[in-house]
Image: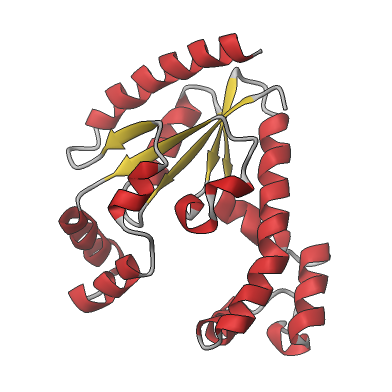
């Protein structure tokens, strides 16, 4: 793979989307795992056919699309079901991300993968560098409660479902500390853009 690829990750409510937007503003392709996951089970896709084969037509809505609410209920109540779903969707997501990055016209591409630490860095051998968006836990909790309108207990459970901060930071080649005003991200991303352009030029 000739395109230089930066894997972007971070915990929930860390500000990954804000960082993504700023890289896109610098003209870089951002391949988003969440979008790839939706496309992987879109109507007519091989992924959706495999999901129906594994779980039955009960997971479909009347229009033939995936009933995401029902699917969530199934997998959150049954670890085996969750693993079966992941075995179908995750390879499709990785393939779509890689293809999008390979097709990127810029000097480098961003692969935005929220659960990179949870899923394992080894599944992405084509990623050259990892950028972690990091915030203190207390900032995450406050932002999550405000963003989703939830209480502290639920916010805490959502954080507990992800790897801890230290584990995620172990993956990092670069870190953006996003505990200040959003405007501060402009300078951070501009500096990283310069660095990645230089690294990409040496990569080719």
Which quadrant holds the N terminus? Answer: top right
Which residue occupies 47% across, 58% down?
118
Q: Is residue 128 left or right of residue 130?
A: right
The image shows residue 80 at horizontal and vertical percentages of: 61, 82
Which residue occupies 57% across, 16% down?
200
The image shows residue 133 at horizontal and vertical percentages of: 34, 41
**Can residue 163 be seen in this snapshot?**
yes
Q: Is residue 38 left or right of residue 180?
A: right
How many numbered dots are placed on residues in this image? 0
Which residue occupies 46% across, 52% down?
117
Which residue occupies 29% across, 31% down?
185
Location of residue 179 by image quarter: top left
Where is 191 relative to 101, above or below?
above
Where is 106 relative to 133, above or below?
above
Which quadrant holds the C terminus? Answer: top right
Q: Is residue 40 left or right of residue 134?
A: right
Figure colour scheme: secondary structure
Where is 48 relative to 170, above or below?
below
As rendered, which of 186 and 88 lies closer to the eye?
A: 88
Q: Is residue 6 left or right of residue 44?
A: left
The image shows residue 32 at horizontal and vertical percentages of: 56, 46
Location of residue 183 by image quarter: top left
**Can residue 64 be seen in this snapshot?**
no
């Amino acid at each position: 793979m000739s395109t230089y690829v930066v894997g972007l990750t971070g915990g929930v409510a860390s500000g990954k989307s804000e960082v993504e937007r700023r890289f896109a503003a610098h003209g870089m392709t951002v391949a988003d795992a969440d979008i790839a996951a939706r496309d992987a089970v879109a109507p007519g896709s091989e992924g959706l056919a495999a999901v129906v084969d594994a779980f039955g037509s009960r997971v479909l809505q009347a229009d033939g699309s995936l009933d995401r609410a029902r699917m969530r209920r199934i997998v959150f109540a049954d670890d085996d079901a969750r693993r079966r779903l992941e075995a179908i969707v995750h390879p499709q997501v990785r393939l779509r991300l890689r293809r999008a990055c390979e097709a990127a016209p810029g000097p480098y591409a961003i692969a935005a993968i929220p659960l990179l630490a949870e899923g394992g860095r080894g599944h992405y051998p084509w990623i050259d560098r990892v950028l972690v968006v990091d915030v203190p836990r207390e900032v995450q909790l406050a932002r999550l409660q405000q963003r989703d309108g939830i209480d502290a207990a639920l916010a805490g459970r959502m954080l507990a479902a992800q790897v801890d901060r230290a584990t995620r930071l172990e993956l990092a080649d670069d870190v953006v500390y996003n505990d200040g005003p959003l405007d501060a991200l402009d300078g951070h991303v501009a500096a990283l853009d310069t660095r990645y352009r230089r690294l990409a030029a040496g990569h080719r």
